[in-house]
Amino acid sequence: MTKYLHYIDGKYVEPSSGKWFDSFNPFTGEVWAQIAQGNAEDVERAVQAAHRELTKGPWSQLTPSQRGVLMHKLGDLIARDAKKLAEIEVRDNGKLIAEMQAQLNYVPNWYYYFGGLADKIQGAVIPLDKKGYFNFTRNEPVGVVGAITPWNSPLMLAAWKVAPALAAGCTVVLKPSEFTSASALEFVKLFEEAGFPPGVVNVVTGFGKEVGMPLVEHPLVRKISFTGSEVTGRLVNETAARQFKRVGLELGGKSPNIVFADAKIEDAVNGAVSGIFAATGQTCIAGSRLLLQESIHDEFVERLVALAKTARMGNPMSMDTQVGPVTTQPQYQKILGYIDIAKNEGAKLLMGGGKATRPECGSGWFVEPTVFAGVNNKMRIAQEEVFGPVLSIIKFKDEDEAVQIANDVRFGLGSGVWTNDIGRAIRMSEKIQAGTVWVNTYRAVSYMSPFGGYKESGMGRENGQDAIREYLQTKSVWINSGAATGNPFVMR
Protein backbone atom coordinates (compact mmCIF):
# COMPACT_ATOMS: atom_id res chain seq x y z
CA MET A 1 0.00 0.00 0.00
CA THR A 2 1.50 3.32 -1.10
CA LYS A 3 1.46 5.99 1.60
CA TYR A 4 1.69 9.68 0.67
CA LEU A 5 2.78 12.49 3.01
CA HIS A 6 2.30 16.26 2.84
CA TYR A 7 5.04 18.24 1.08
CA ILE A 8 5.90 21.34 3.14
CA ASP A 9 8.98 23.54 2.97
CA GLY A 10 10.82 21.16 0.68
CA LYS A 11 10.21 18.05 2.80
CA TYR A 12 7.69 15.22 2.96
CA VAL A 13 6.10 15.42 6.41
CA GLU A 14 3.52 13.36 8.26
CA PRO A 15 0.11 14.90 9.02
CA SER A 16 -0.01 16.60 12.40
CA SER A 17 -3.26 14.72 13.08
CA GLY A 18 -1.58 11.35 12.53
CA LYS A 19 -4.55 10.42 10.33
CA TRP A 20 -4.73 9.01 6.80
CA PHE A 21 -7.53 8.41 4.33
CA ASP A 22 -7.93 5.96 1.48
CA SER A 23 -7.63 6.62 -2.24
CA PHE A 24 -9.65 4.29 -4.48
CA ASN A 25 -8.97 2.96 -7.96
CA PRO A 26 -12.24 3.66 -9.85
CA PHE A 27 -11.71 0.71 -12.20
CA THR A 28 -11.47 -1.87 -9.42
CA GLY A 29 -13.22 -0.01 -6.62
CA GLU A 30 -10.32 -1.00 -4.36
CA VAL A 31 -8.03 1.06 -2.14
CA TRP A 32 -4.60 1.50 -3.69
CA ALA A 33 -3.04 4.29 -1.60
CA GLN A 34 -3.30 6.16 1.67
CA ILE A 35 -3.13 9.95 1.78
CA ALA A 36 -2.16 12.26 4.65
CA GLN A 37 -5.26 13.81 6.22
CA GLY A 38 -4.35 17.44 6.80
CA ASN A 39 -5.81 20.06 9.09
CA ALA A 40 -5.42 23.76 9.91
CA GLU A 41 -2.08 23.12 11.63
CA ASP A 42 -0.63 21.62 8.44
CA VAL A 43 -2.01 24.55 6.43
CA GLU A 44 -0.36 26.97 8.86
CA ARG A 45 3.03 25.32 8.40
CA ALA A 46 2.70 25.38 4.63
CA VAL A 47 1.52 28.98 4.41
CA GLN A 48 4.28 30.17 6.76
CA ALA A 49 6.88 28.41 4.58
CA ALA A 50 5.43 29.96 1.43
CA HIS A 51 5.26 33.43 3.02
CA ARG A 52 8.82 33.25 4.29
CA GLU A 53 10.08 32.27 0.86
CA LEU A 54 8.03 35.03 -0.76
CA THR A 55 9.34 37.77 1.51
CA LYS A 56 12.77 36.71 2.78
CA GLY A 57 13.93 33.55 1.05
CA PRO A 58 16.06 32.96 -2.05
CA TRP A 59 12.95 32.95 -4.25
CA SER A 60 12.32 36.62 -3.40
CA GLN A 61 15.82 37.49 -4.64
CA LEU A 62 15.61 35.78 -8.03
CA THR A 63 15.20 37.85 -11.15
CA PRO A 64 12.24 37.07 -13.41
CA SER A 65 14.64 35.51 -15.91
CA GLN A 66 16.06 33.23 -13.22
CA ARG A 67 12.54 32.13 -12.28
CA GLY A 68 11.94 31.36 -15.94
CA VAL A 69 15.03 29.15 -16.14
CA LEU A 70 13.83 27.10 -13.17
CA MET A 71 10.39 26.73 -14.71
CA HIS A 72 11.91 25.52 -17.97
CA LYS A 73 13.90 22.89 -16.06
CA LEU A 74 10.71 21.83 -14.33
CA GLY A 75 8.98 21.43 -17.68
CA ASP A 76 11.79 19.17 -18.87
CA LEU A 77 11.45 16.98 -15.78
CA ILE A 78 7.68 16.68 -16.23
CA ALA A 79 8.28 15.61 -19.84
CA ARG A 80 10.75 13.00 -18.65
CA ASP A 81 8.30 11.58 -16.08
CA ALA A 82 5.10 12.08 -18.09
CA LYS A 83 4.39 8.37 -18.52
CA LYS A 84 4.79 7.60 -14.82
CA LEU A 85 2.66 10.57 -13.76
CA ALA A 86 -0.05 9.70 -16.29
CA GLU A 87 -0.27 6.13 -14.98
CA ILE A 88 -0.65 7.41 -11.42
CA GLU A 89 -3.47 9.71 -12.51
CA VAL A 90 -5.29 6.86 -14.27
CA ARG A 91 -4.99 4.70 -11.17
CA ASP A 92 -6.33 7.56 -9.07
CA ASN A 93 -9.11 9.02 -11.25
CA GLY A 94 -9.95 6.29 -13.77
CA LYS A 95 -9.63 8.46 -16.86
CA LEU A 96 -8.21 6.94 -20.01
CA ILE A 97 -4.45 6.45 -20.26
CA ALA A 98 -4.73 7.78 -23.82
CA GLU A 99 -6.10 11.08 -22.50
CA MET A 100 -3.94 11.38 -19.39
CA GLN A 101 -0.77 10.53 -21.31
CA ALA A 102 -1.64 13.21 -23.87
CA GLN A 103 -2.29 15.70 -21.07
CA LEU A 104 0.98 14.96 -19.28
CA ASN A 105 2.89 15.22 -22.55
CA TYR A 106 1.30 18.65 -23.00
CA VAL A 107 1.63 19.96 -19.43
CA PRO A 108 5.33 20.98 -19.75
CA ASN A 109 4.24 23.67 -22.18
CA TRP A 110 2.58 25.62 -19.37
CA TYR A 111 5.90 25.87 -17.56
CA TYR A 112 7.79 26.70 -20.76
CA TYR A 113 5.27 29.36 -21.80
CA PHE A 114 4.92 31.08 -18.45
CA GLY A 115 8.63 30.66 -17.72
CA GLY A 116 9.26 32.59 -20.92
CA LEU A 117 6.64 35.16 -19.96
CA ALA A 118 8.12 35.80 -16.51
CA ASP A 119 10.53 38.50 -17.72
CA LYS A 120 8.17 40.00 -20.30
CA ILE A 121 5.81 41.67 -17.84
CA GLN A 122 6.60 45.37 -17.94
CA GLY A 123 5.46 48.44 -16.09
CA ALA A 124 4.91 51.79 -17.77
CA VAL A 125 5.99 55.40 -17.56
CA ILE A 126 2.90 57.56 -17.27
CA PRO A 127 2.85 60.82 -19.32
CA LEU A 128 1.49 62.93 -16.48
CA ASP A 129 -0.54 66.12 -16.70
CA LYS A 130 1.51 67.53 -13.79
CA LYS A 131 4.91 69.16 -14.16
CA GLY A 132 7.77 68.30 -11.85
CA TYR A 133 6.78 64.69 -11.26
CA PHE A 134 7.96 61.37 -12.64
CA ASN A 135 5.44 58.52 -12.41
CA PHE A 136 5.91 54.86 -13.28
CA THR A 137 4.23 51.54 -12.47
CA ARG A 138 5.58 48.25 -11.18
CA ASN A 139 3.95 44.83 -11.38
CA GLU A 140 4.53 42.84 -8.19
CA PRO A 141 3.44 39.37 -7.03
CA VAL A 142 0.09 39.40 -5.28
CA GLY A 143 1.44 37.15 -2.50
CA VAL A 144 0.96 33.59 -1.31
CA VAL A 145 -1.47 31.72 -3.55
CA GLY A 146 -3.86 29.05 -2.35
CA ALA A 147 -4.54 26.73 -5.32
CA ILE A 148 -7.44 24.29 -4.95
CA THR A 149 -7.77 21.78 -7.78
CA PRO A 150 -10.39 19.15 -8.80
CA TRP A 151 -10.16 15.44 -9.49
CA ASN A 152 -10.80 15.24 -13.22
CA SER A 153 -7.43 16.49 -14.63
CA PRO A 154 -5.25 16.97 -11.54
CA LEU A 155 -1.83 17.95 -12.89
CA MET A 156 -3.02 19.82 -15.96
CA LEU A 157 -5.38 22.00 -13.96
CA ALA A 158 -2.69 22.48 -11.32
CA ALA A 159 -0.40 23.76 -14.08
CA TRP A 160 -3.06 26.31 -15.06
CA LYS A 161 -2.62 27.82 -11.59
CA VAL A 162 0.92 27.06 -10.49
CA ALA A 163 2.72 28.10 -13.70
CA PRO A 164 1.40 31.69 -13.94
CA ALA A 165 1.69 32.12 -10.17
CA LEU A 166 5.39 31.18 -10.23
CA ALA A 167 6.04 33.34 -13.29
CA ALA A 168 4.56 36.28 -11.40
CA GLY A 169 6.89 35.61 -8.46
CA CYS A 170 4.26 34.22 -6.08
CA THR A 171 4.59 31.15 -3.89
CA VAL A 172 1.94 28.44 -3.70
CA VAL A 173 0.14 26.13 -1.31
CA LEU A 174 -1.63 23.50 -3.41
CA LYS A 175 -4.62 21.59 -2.08
CA PRO A 176 -5.48 18.80 -4.55
CA SER A 177 -8.80 16.97 -4.50
CA GLU A 178 -9.05 14.39 -1.75
CA PHE A 179 -10.03 11.91 -4.48
CA THR A 180 -6.88 12.40 -6.58
CA SER A 181 -3.98 13.61 -4.45
CA ALA A 182 -1.30 11.10 -5.41
CA SER A 183 -0.08 12.65 -8.66
CA ALA A 184 0.43 16.06 -7.04
CA LEU A 185 2.58 14.48 -4.33
CA GLU A 186 4.64 12.65 -6.94
CA PHE A 187 4.92 15.73 -9.12
CA VAL A 188 6.01 18.13 -6.38
CA LYS A 189 9.30 16.29 -5.80
CA LEU A 190 10.39 17.59 -9.22
CA PHE A 191 10.60 21.14 -7.86
CA GLU A 192 13.56 20.24 -5.69
CA GLU A 193 15.24 18.43 -8.58
CA ALA A 194 14.72 21.49 -10.80
CA GLY A 195 16.41 23.70 -8.22
CA PHE A 196 13.47 25.58 -6.71
CA PRO A 197 14.10 26.80 -3.14
CA PRO A 198 12.15 24.99 -0.40
CA GLY A 199 8.78 26.53 0.38
CA VAL A 200 8.02 27.88 -3.10
CA VAL A 201 5.43 25.15 -3.75
CA ASN A 202 3.83 23.16 -0.93
CA VAL A 203 1.14 20.47 -1.03
CA VAL A 204 -1.30 19.83 1.82
CA THR A 205 -3.81 17.04 1.27
CA GLY A 206 -7.14 16.42 2.92
CA PHE A 207 -10.76 17.51 2.91
CA GLY A 208 -12.44 20.81 2.21
CA LYS A 209 -13.47 21.77 5.74
CA GLU A 210 -10.18 20.68 7.31
CA VAL A 211 -7.72 21.97 4.67
CA GLY A 212 -9.53 23.94 1.98
CA MET A 213 -11.32 26.43 4.20
CA PRO A 214 -8.33 27.09 6.53
CA LEU A 215 -6.33 27.82 3.37
CA VAL A 216 -9.00 30.23 2.09
CA GLU A 217 -9.27 31.89 5.51
CA HIS A 218 -5.54 32.25 6.23
CA PRO A 219 -4.62 35.97 6.42
CA LEU A 220 -1.25 35.45 4.70
CA VAL A 221 -2.89 33.91 1.62
CA ARG A 222 -3.71 36.79 -0.71
CA LYS A 223 -5.02 34.95 -3.76
CA ILE A 224 -7.27 31.92 -4.07
CA SER A 225 -7.52 30.04 -7.35
CA PHE A 226 -10.26 27.42 -7.23
CA THR A 227 -11.62 24.95 -9.77
CA GLY A 228 -14.67 22.92 -8.80
CA SER A 229 -18.42 23.11 -8.33
CA GLU A 230 -20.33 26.39 -8.23
CA VAL A 231 -21.66 25.52 -4.77
CA THR A 232 -18.18 25.28 -3.27
CA GLY A 233 -16.96 28.16 -5.42
CA ARG A 234 -19.61 30.44 -3.98
CA LEU A 235 -18.52 29.54 -0.45
CA VAL A 236 -14.87 30.11 -1.34
CA ASN A 237 -15.67 33.50 -2.83
CA GLU A 238 -17.79 34.63 0.11
CA THR A 239 -15.16 33.51 2.61
CA ALA A 240 -12.26 35.12 0.76
CA ALA A 241 -14.18 38.37 0.32
CA ARG A 242 -14.14 38.96 4.06
CA GLN A 243 -10.40 39.60 3.80
CA PHE A 244 -10.60 41.21 0.34
CA LYS A 245 -8.51 38.46 -1.22
CA ARG A 246 -8.10 38.07 -4.94
CA VAL A 247 -10.22 35.16 -6.17
CA GLY A 248 -10.20 33.20 -9.42
CA LEU A 249 -13.02 30.70 -9.91
CA GLU A 250 -13.44 28.14 -12.68
CA LEU A 251 -16.73 26.45 -11.94
CA GLY A 252 -19.42 24.38 -13.60
CA GLY A 253 -20.93 24.41 -17.04
CA LYS A 254 -23.94 23.30 -19.05
CA SER A 255 -22.45 23.96 -22.42
CA PRO A 256 -24.56 24.11 -25.61
CA ASN A 257 -23.17 22.30 -28.66
CA ILE A 258 -25.18 23.81 -31.53
CA VAL A 259 -25.48 22.16 -34.93
CA PHE A 260 -27.01 24.01 -37.88
CA ALA A 261 -28.42 22.34 -40.98
CA ASP A 262 -25.55 23.60 -43.14
CA ALA A 263 -22.87 21.97 -40.98
CA LYS A 264 -20.72 19.10 -42.17
CA ILE A 265 -22.72 16.36 -40.45
CA GLU A 266 -19.95 13.80 -40.04
CA ASP A 267 -17.68 16.30 -38.31
CA ALA A 268 -20.50 17.54 -36.10
CA VAL A 269 -21.48 14.02 -35.05
CA ASN A 270 -17.87 13.30 -34.10
CA GLY A 271 -17.71 16.61 -32.22
CA ALA A 272 -20.94 15.93 -30.36
CA VAL A 273 -19.80 12.47 -29.25
CA SER A 274 -16.37 13.76 -28.25
CA GLY A 275 -17.93 16.71 -26.44
CA ILE A 276 -19.92 14.56 -24.03
CA PHE A 277 -18.48 11.03 -23.91
CA ALA A 278 -14.76 11.83 -23.98
CA ALA A 279 -13.42 11.87 -20.41
CA THR A 280 -16.67 10.04 -19.47
CA GLY A 281 -18.34 13.44 -19.48
CA GLN A 282 -16.30 14.45 -16.44
CA THR A 283 -15.25 17.84 -17.67
CA CYS A 284 -16.63 21.29 -16.94
CA ILE A 285 -16.79 22.06 -20.68
CA ALA A 286 -18.72 18.92 -21.62
CA GLY A 287 -21.14 19.61 -24.47
CA SER A 288 -23.98 18.21 -22.41
CA ARG A 289 -26.74 20.04 -24.31
CA LEU A 290 -26.83 19.16 -28.01
CA LEU A 291 -28.94 21.72 -29.88
CA LEU A 292 -30.02 20.41 -33.31
CA GLN A 293 -31.77 22.38 -36.03
CA GLU A 294 -35.12 20.74 -36.74
CA SER A 295 -34.47 19.83 -40.38
CA ILE A 296 -31.49 17.59 -39.54
CA HIS A 297 -32.62 16.35 -36.13
CA ASP A 298 -33.69 12.81 -37.00
CA GLU A 299 -30.78 12.00 -39.31
CA PHE A 300 -28.27 13.46 -36.89
CA VAL A 301 -29.64 11.58 -33.89
CA GLU A 302 -29.59 8.29 -35.79
CA ARG A 303 -25.95 8.74 -36.76
CA LEU A 304 -24.93 9.96 -33.31
CA VAL A 305 -26.51 7.00 -31.51
CA ALA A 306 -24.95 4.57 -33.97
CA LEU A 307 -21.49 6.03 -33.32
CA ALA A 308 -21.95 6.26 -29.55
CA LYS A 309 -22.95 2.60 -29.37
CA THR A 310 -19.52 1.61 -30.70
CA ALA A 311 -17.75 3.06 -27.66
CA ARG A 312 -15.41 0.54 -26.05
CA MET A 313 -15.62 0.54 -22.25
CA GLY A 314 -13.22 -1.13 -19.86
CA ASN A 315 -9.80 -0.83 -18.30
CA PRO A 316 -8.66 2.81 -18.55
CA MET A 317 -5.04 1.63 -18.67
CA SER A 318 -5.72 0.10 -22.09
CA MET A 319 -5.08 2.33 -25.10
CA ASP A 320 -8.10 0.71 -26.82
CA THR A 321 -10.59 1.84 -24.17
CA GLN A 322 -12.76 4.81 -25.15
CA VAL A 323 -14.98 5.30 -22.09
CA GLY A 324 -13.65 4.70 -18.60
CA PRO A 325 -15.20 4.62 -15.14
CA VAL A 326 -16.56 7.53 -13.13
CA THR A 327 -13.85 8.83 -10.80
CA THR A 328 -15.66 8.79 -7.45
CA GLN A 329 -18.40 6.73 -5.84
CA PRO A 330 -20.46 9.85 -4.91
CA GLN A 331 -20.27 11.12 -8.50
CA TYR A 332 -21.27 7.68 -9.80
CA GLN A 333 -24.42 7.77 -7.67
CA LYS A 334 -25.12 11.38 -8.67
CA ILE A 335 -25.03 10.54 -12.39
CA LEU A 336 -27.38 7.58 -11.94
CA GLY A 337 -29.68 9.87 -9.98
CA TYR A 338 -29.81 12.41 -12.78
CA ILE A 339 -30.64 9.67 -15.28
CA ASP A 340 -33.66 8.78 -13.14
CA ILE A 341 -34.61 12.46 -12.95
CA ALA A 342 -34.53 12.75 -16.74
CA LYS A 343 -36.73 9.69 -17.15
CA ASN A 344 -39.22 11.07 -14.64
CA GLU A 345 -39.25 14.46 -16.40
CA GLY A 346 -40.35 12.79 -19.61
CA ALA A 347 -37.15 12.87 -21.62
CA LYS A 348 -36.97 10.07 -24.22
CA LEU A 349 -34.16 7.60 -23.52
CA LEU A 350 -32.43 6.58 -26.77
CA MET A 351 -29.51 4.60 -25.36
CA GLY A 352 -27.77 3.76 -22.11
CA GLY A 353 -29.65 4.88 -19.05
CA GLY A 354 -27.93 3.08 -16.20
CA LYS A 355 -24.84 1.46 -14.79
CA ALA A 356 -22.72 -0.59 -17.15
CA THR A 357 -22.85 -4.33 -16.65
CA ARG A 358 -20.47 -5.31 -19.44
CA PRO A 359 -17.94 -7.97 -18.36
CA GLU A 360 -15.04 -5.72 -19.31
CA CYS A 361 -16.21 -3.15 -16.76
CA GLY A 362 -15.70 -5.54 -13.86
CA SER A 363 -16.56 -4.05 -10.48
CA GLY A 364 -15.70 -0.49 -11.47
CA TRP A 365 -17.93 2.58 -11.33
CA PHE A 366 -19.12 2.60 -14.94
CA VAL A 367 -22.16 4.38 -16.40
CA GLU A 368 -23.34 3.52 -19.90
CA PRO A 369 -23.07 6.41 -22.41
CA THR A 370 -26.59 7.82 -22.23
CA VAL A 371 -28.58 9.89 -24.72
CA PHE A 372 -31.91 11.61 -24.09
CA ALA A 373 -34.02 13.21 -26.83
CA GLY A 374 -37.17 15.29 -26.53
CA VAL A 375 -35.54 17.40 -23.84
CA ASN A 376 -37.07 20.74 -22.91
CA ASN A 377 -34.52 23.32 -21.82
CA LYS A 378 -36.46 23.91 -18.60
CA MET A 379 -35.91 20.32 -17.46
CA ARG A 380 -33.37 19.77 -14.68
CA ILE A 381 -31.37 17.51 -17.00
CA ALA A 382 -30.85 20.59 -19.23
CA GLN A 383 -30.22 23.10 -16.46
CA GLU A 384 -28.03 21.30 -13.91
CA GLU A 385 -24.52 19.97 -14.38
CA VAL A 386 -24.46 16.17 -14.39
CA PHE A 387 -20.69 15.78 -14.91
CA GLY A 388 -21.05 12.41 -16.55
CA PRO A 389 -21.72 10.67 -19.90
CA VAL A 390 -25.28 11.95 -20.27
CA LEU A 391 -26.38 13.91 -23.35
CA SER A 392 -29.57 15.98 -23.66
CA ILE A 393 -30.81 16.69 -27.20
CA ILE A 394 -32.90 19.82 -27.80
CA LYS A 395 -34.48 20.98 -31.09
CA PHE A 396 -34.36 24.56 -32.37
CA LYS A 397 -35.80 26.37 -35.43
CA ASP A 398 -33.42 29.21 -36.26
CA GLU A 399 -30.49 31.27 -35.01
CA ASP A 400 -32.55 33.38 -32.64
CA GLU A 401 -34.05 30.36 -30.92
CA ALA A 402 -30.65 28.64 -30.76
CA VAL A 403 -29.17 31.69 -29.00
CA GLN A 404 -32.14 31.92 -26.63
CA ILE A 405 -31.82 28.26 -25.61
CA ALA A 406 -28.03 28.38 -25.42
CA ASN A 407 -28.07 31.35 -23.03
CA ASP A 408 -31.02 30.16 -20.94
CA VAL A 409 -28.89 28.61 -18.18
CA ARG A 410 -27.03 30.09 -15.22
CA PHE A 411 -23.70 28.85 -16.60
CA GLY A 412 -21.50 30.23 -19.35
CA LEU A 413 -18.25 28.31 -19.69
CA GLY A 414 -18.02 26.66 -23.11
CA SER A 415 -20.09 26.38 -26.28
CA GLY A 416 -19.87 24.91 -29.75
CA VAL A 417 -21.22 26.06 -33.11
CA TRP A 418 -21.23 23.84 -36.21
CA THR A 419 -21.89 25.67 -39.47
CA ASN A 420 -20.35 26.35 -42.88
CA ASP A 421 -21.65 29.93 -42.85
CA ILE A 422 -18.85 32.22 -41.64
CA GLY A 423 -21.30 35.05 -41.07
CA ARG A 424 -23.41 32.84 -38.82
CA ALA A 425 -20.29 31.67 -36.98
CA ILE A 426 -19.35 35.27 -36.18
CA ARG A 427 -22.88 36.25 -35.19
CA MET A 428 -23.20 33.27 -32.87
CA SER A 429 -19.80 33.94 -31.29
CA GLU A 430 -21.00 37.46 -30.49
CA LYS A 431 -24.34 36.42 -29.01
CA ILE A 432 -23.49 33.31 -26.98
CA GLN A 433 -22.81 34.11 -23.34
CA ALA A 434 -19.81 31.89 -22.69
CA GLY A 435 -16.11 32.29 -22.07
CA THR A 436 -15.22 30.03 -25.01
CA VAL A 437 -16.96 29.54 -28.34
CA TRP A 438 -15.65 26.71 -30.52
CA VAL A 439 -16.62 26.79 -34.19
CA ASN A 440 -16.52 23.45 -36.06
CA THR A 441 -14.47 21.91 -33.23
CA TYR A 442 -14.92 21.21 -29.53
CA ARG A 443 -12.80 20.95 -26.33
CA ALA A 444 -9.68 22.57 -27.82
CA VAL A 445 -7.55 24.33 -25.17
CA SER A 446 -4.09 25.87 -25.14
CA TYR A 447 -1.70 27.37 -22.61
CA MET A 448 -1.69 30.43 -24.92
CA SER A 449 -5.44 31.13 -24.99
CA PRO A 450 -7.45 32.56 -22.06
CA PHE A 451 -10.02 30.27 -20.47
CA GLY A 452 -12.80 31.09 -18.03
CA GLY A 453 -16.50 31.54 -17.55
CA TYR A 454 -19.39 33.95 -17.78
CA LYS A 455 -22.19 34.12 -15.21
CA GLU A 456 -22.05 31.37 -12.56
CA SER A 457 -19.26 29.54 -14.36
CA GLY A 458 -16.77 31.68 -12.51
CA MET A 459 -14.56 34.76 -12.63
CA GLY A 460 -11.07 35.51 -13.83
CA ARG A 461 -9.11 33.83 -16.59
CA GLU A 462 -6.57 31.03 -16.78
CA ASN A 463 -4.01 30.47 -19.56
CA GLY A 464 -2.52 33.02 -21.91
CA GLN A 465 -1.22 36.44 -20.95
CA ASP A 466 -4.45 37.17 -19.10
CA ALA A 467 -3.55 34.49 -16.55
CA ILE A 468 -0.33 36.02 -15.23
CA ARG A 469 -2.12 39.31 -14.54
CA GLU A 470 -4.36 37.40 -12.10
CA TYR A 471 -1.26 36.93 -9.90
CA LEU A 472 0.15 40.47 -10.15
CA GLN A 473 -0.73 43.74 -8.50
CA THR A 474 0.14 47.16 -9.87
CA LYS A 475 2.04 49.73 -7.85
CA SER A 476 2.19 53.37 -8.93
CA VAL A 477 5.42 55.18 -7.98
CA TRP A 478 5.54 59.01 -7.87
CA ILE A 479 8.85 60.88 -7.75
CA ASN A 480 9.03 64.62 -7.22
CA SER A 481 11.58 65.81 -9.77
CA GLY A 482 11.26 69.50 -9.02
CA ALA A 483 7.68 70.43 -8.20
CA ALA A 484 7.14 73.03 -5.48
CA THR A 485 5.75 71.70 -2.21
CA GLY A 486 2.94 74.26 -2.06
CA ASN A 487 0.08 74.41 0.39
CA PRO A 488 0.13 71.15 2.47
CA PHE A 489 -3.64 71.33 2.96
CA VAL A 490 -4.46 71.28 -0.74
CA MET A 491 -4.31 68.13 -2.82
CA ARG A 492 -2.13 68.50 -5.92
Image: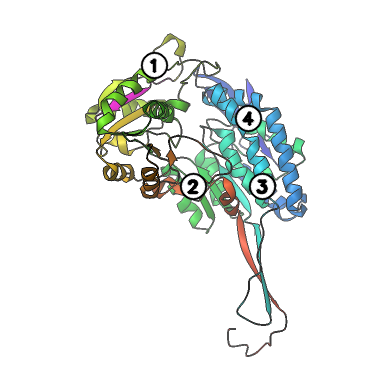
Does 427 sit above or below residue 490? above
**Gap between marks 2 and 1, in whole Å?**
34 Å
Q: Which residues are magenta?
A: 366-375
Q: Nearer the viewer, mark 3 or mark 4?
A: 4
Label 4 crowd (10 A; few <14 / some 14-19 / many >=20): many
Single out the mark in the foreground, 2 or 4: 4
Cα distance, mark 1 to mark 3? 43 Å
Residue identifier under label 3 = 166
Which of the two discs, 4 and 1, sits closer to the camera?
4
For the residues labelled 3 and 4, the Cα–Cα distance comes to: 20 Å
SS type, badge 1? loop
Furthest-left residue in this view: 346
- Judge whether 172 appears above or below 5 on screen: below
What's the mark number on residue 249? 2
Question: Which sits earlier in the primary sequence, circle 3 or circle 4?
Answer: 4
Q: Amino acid at mark 4?
A: Asn
Quadrant of the drawing holding the C terminus: bottom right
Quadrant of the image for the N terminus?
top right
Q: Say left or right for 151 vs 86.
A: left
Magenta-span inclusion, residue 373: yes
Inspect the magenta stretch and tell me whether residue 252 lies in it: no
Q: Which residue is mark 1?
A: 356
Relative to 355, is 199 above or below? below
Q: Amino acid under label 2?
A: Leu
Label ID, residue 105: 4
How would you classify the magenta stretch by its main secondary structure?
Answer: loop
Among numbered discs 1 and 3, the one appearing first in the sequence = 3
